[in-house]
Image (cartoon, grey):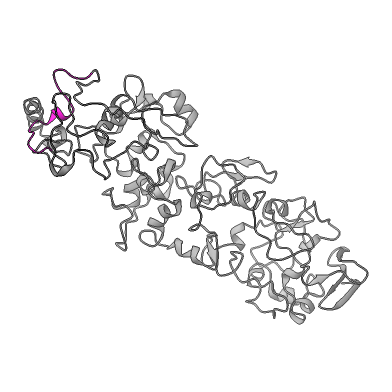
Amino acid sequence: MSRRILLPTCLLGLTLGLPVHAASVVDSVHNLSASGAGSIRASDESGVCMFCHTPHDASPDTPLWNRRLPGTTYTPYASSTAVAAPGQPTGASLLCLGCHDGTVALGDVLGRDEPIAMTGGTDRMPAGRALTGTDLRHHHPVSFVYDAVLAGRQGELALPSALPPEIALDAAGQLQCTSCHDPHDDRFGAFLVMPNRNSRLCTTCHRPAGWHASAHARSDAAWTGAGPSPWPHSGETTVSGNGCRNCHEAHQAAGGPLLLRAAPEAAVCAACHDGRMAARDVMRDFEQFSAHPVPQTSLTHDPAEPAVVRDRHVSCSDCHGPHDHGAGPADAPGQLRGVDLNNAAVEPAAHRWQVCLRCHGDSPGKRTPLVRRQFDQDNLRLEIQPANPSFHPVAAPGRNPDVPSLLPPWTPQSLVDCTDCHHSGDSARPHGSVHEPLLARRYETRDRTPESPSAYALCYGCHSRDSILRDASFAAHARHVRDASAPCSVCHDAHGISATQGNPLNNSHLVNFDTTVVTANTAGRLRFVDEGRFRGRCDLSCHGVEHRGEGY
């Protein structure tokens, strides 16, 4: 009977010049009869359609359903960022799960007293990509109302009225398995209703801001052939061809509610950025002596997490926007959340330092600073405030118009980006470095370090060594740095001194003494006093030398 029903469809395909398999279930793995094309098939049953449909005595479920429904309770999809709240599967999705959840025998049809025997003992859906199980948390959500209200609240979904006819919602306006899959037509693979090359199917509904201009959407980079393929199941060979599938799987996603292809998140990025596909092996940066501990993180970035990180972690997407990396201002890394100088969330971040402040500002659990200072501070947000006694000009230009040591193109009005000082040495990426703490160049903080271009290469990258050793701005630079082998860090705190701890008289010019080297003098005083342009005096003890109002 099933063959007689299908025959006109096949003949119509021939008449129109269409490929027969494109309009027929017969040549697909959904043909569970003994003549089926897949490895899962009946021992001797010749009927094709009967595994799902029957013209008589069907269940109340449309269309003429011939299967027993699974009597199980499912764990539905849930996500911190999902606006929809799927419940138990309904409609066509529940019918699909009648085979794909693995709880009902494949041959258990209403038209037979006994289940149809299957070959190889595959009476139920075997382990593999087609088995969903009853835990749906790692699968694209189904059985939820997709309406204009949902699209408006979510912000990156197409309006239902804008969906093409291939993406069909059911009579209740719910998105079901059949919105993306046509069980009778496998011309596009995975029974998809349209090709998904360049994420055509995904972006029919999902409209992430900046996606079409992103590298993940546009790059034609291909797998080098080294190691395992980054895309073992897609059949595509380029980054742009895979699109969303570079990172996401709609079913059996290993990475939890974000539907990531692997877990932890870094493993998803590593599949391409370890040299197998991307030109640069970024993952090697994280093996450096000082690095962001991305491979070791046990927590994955959650787009809904607080702007100020409370559970300290660092995943790739904490700093990079995978959907729109590179969008926005030149010094901002895409549509990412940040923190401003008032500790308020900003989204998207306008500057890179705002992203850095999520972890390096008011978040708890930061390590002890490498240099112990008169005023210890581990909060970068407080250190770079423009109202501070002094600060490196990260968030605002500096106030000192006289900085004769600056090398071109730096000027007293220049802004400094975090990655000017913190990066991987041969790139502007703050992934890892041989110099702690993740510094672009060497910066010695050990007392009695002989002065050299390499010892203070970080400082000399912006400040002229010649100017410093000629005492152009401070009459005793050479005596301290070269003659006494005192590191820059003994007197200067690179980020800045908080206005809650210091004052303009004693803490201008980033002066905040290293107390393992500089201590109070016999009068109990430990201070620098600013006395105007290129003038000051000190009360302290350093290298056994007493300073009592010693002026410069």
Name the spot of residue 6 as percent of width and height, x first: 10, 28
Tell me the quarter of the image containing the C terminus.
bottom right
Please give left or right for residue 107 compared with residue 236 in the image: left
* Residue in view at x 77 percent, y 70 percent: 516
Q: Position of residue 303 (x, y in %)?
A: 51, 42
Is residue 19 in view? no
The dominant secondary structure in magenta is loop
Residue in the foreground of this view, choosing between 90 and 302: 90
With 126 as the anchor, is 436 left or right in this view?
right
Q: Write the start and end of the magenta stretch as one range.
A: 42-59
Residue lying furthest right in this view?
523
Give the side of residue 309 with respect to residue 170, left or right: right
Classify 125 as above or below 111: below
The reply to whether the magenta stretch includes residue 131 is no
- Specify the quadrant of the image occupied by residue 73: top left
**Which residue is found at the position 18% from the left and 41% from the top?**
122
Report the side of 401 relative to 537 (left or right): left
* Relative vertical location of residue 66 with respect to residue 309 in this rendering, above or below: above
- Looking at the image, the residue that sits furthest to the front is 114
Residue 446 in view here: yes
Query: Residue at image x 30%, y 33%?
Result: 180
Residue 55 within the magenta-colored segment of the rendering: yes
Relative depth, front residue between 345 and 258: 258
Instruction: State the quadrant of the N terminus.
Output: top left
Residue 450: % across, % down: 69, 81
State the image quarter where residue 530 is shown: bottom right
Quarter of the image for residue 51 reads top left
